[in-house]
Image (spheres, grey):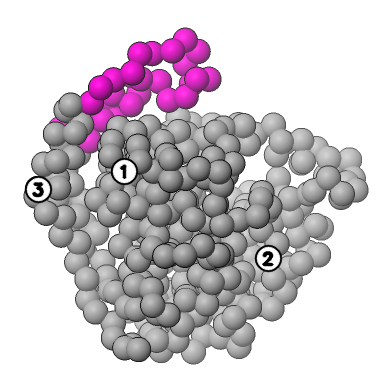
Amino acid sequence: MSHEIRPFRIDVPQAELDDLHTRLANTRWSRPLPGGWDRGVPVEVVREFAEHWRTGFDWRAREAELNGFPQYLTEIDGTEIHFLHVRSPRPDALPLLLTHGWPNSFVEFVDLVGHLTPDFHVVVPSVPGFGFSGAPTETGWDAARVARLWARLMDRLGYAEYGTQGGDFGAYVAPEVAKVGLGRVVGVYVISGLGFPTADDELTGDEQRLFAELMNADWMHGVDHLALLRSAPQTFAHGWHDSPVGALAWMLQKFHDFNSSDRPLAESIDRDRFLTNLSIHWFTGTSGTSAWPYYDSSGPAWPVGQRSVPTGVYSGPPGIRRLAERTNDIVHWPEHNPAGHHFIAMDQPAALAADLREFFAKVR
């Protein structure tokens, strides 16, 4: 098998851009239902975003911005992997592998990379089935399989040691990278998700309060995408793939559900950054193929982590450190980092970068 690493540039044909605009202009709008956000994304919100996507959003400018990052393709174990590889000016910088979540893409880290490169060589792969990476052609994929691809990728790039980070689905992948990259991974950093209790855990009074905060959080009561994507992802993929407004409404629903800040979505995530991520899904036709982490899962479960190397988190509570330490060597558990959107790299990139530097300074 070839170990070739090929330069890559995004170049969406104009015909595809024209087709998107035509589909948006010809949308058959649904009737508003009473109840506002309690019934889903309000029609007026989707219409506003759709109109901006059609007439105000400059894809060519966003495409040029993304092409400002060095991008590559390489085949690993029969799967085409797309990735950014942005080197630091410091020769001794620590390589840092970032894994995005769902329904995001490598766009999740566009605003973070510049904050990291003074201290890190940054590698951002696209998870198989997302964006410009190839999609799984059979069932049975899991986070551990992605981690094996990532470890092979870092080997191919010639990195003898590196750190690994992830949030959302990346919080499952990053610890698995440490397991397969023994002796090379110096530390695992996750955004959140460690130390969440189960029904079998006995909790102290303070821990019960944290658990109540978790269960009462707005993002715990949105659309159950895990159940939906485990049961019938192909059914919904027909709509997401054919209708840009269908894909837009679904993405708005999830970014709204995942907004754990006290600010409106538009104040947490830049509108054009949101639409750049959506456009990547639309132009690559991956709204359906990116569902595999859910339909290949056995059910809802929080990340467990690993004990191979030290672990740090961006956000501790409502996770419980005592519970997280049962399966992790926790050396970094801040409780006062700036809160924000579930996709914190898009909301608070400077704060996230500062905390990453603090953690990896402890473990390298």
Residue 128 visible here = no
Residue 327 visible here = yes
Residue 245 placement, left or right of 112: left
Q: Quadrant of residue 179?
A: bottom right
Q: Quadrant of the image for the N terminus?
A: bottom left
Q: What's the distance in space between the residues labelled 3 and 1, CA to CA?
A: 16 Å
**Residue at the image point whose x is 66% and y is 49% from the top:** 300
Amino acid of disc 3: Ala
Q: Which SS class for mark 2?
A: loop
Numbered label tally: 3
Using the image, tell me which numbered label, if any, was put on residue 15.
Answer: 3
- 303 shown above or below 40: below
- 269 shown above or below 357: above
Q: Classify 10 Å Cα crowding around label 1: few (below 14), some (14-19), many (20 and above).
A: some
Which residue position holds label 2? 305
Pair 1/2: label in front: 1
Q: Classify 10 Å Cα crowding around label 2: few (below 14), some (14-19), many (20 and above).
A: many
Q: Position of residue 75 (x, y in %)?
A: 34, 78
Using the image, tell me which numbered label, if any, was put on residue 241.
Answer: 1
Q: Which SS class for mark 3?
A: helix
The answer to which of marks 1 and 2 sits earlier in the sequence is 1
The answer to which of marks 3 and 1 sits earlier in the sequence is 3
Q: What's the distance in space between the residues labelled 1 and 2, CA to CA?
A: 34 Å
Q: Quadrant of residue 44?
A: top left
The residue nearer to you, when weighing 188 against 45, is 45
Residue 259 placement, left or right of 283: right
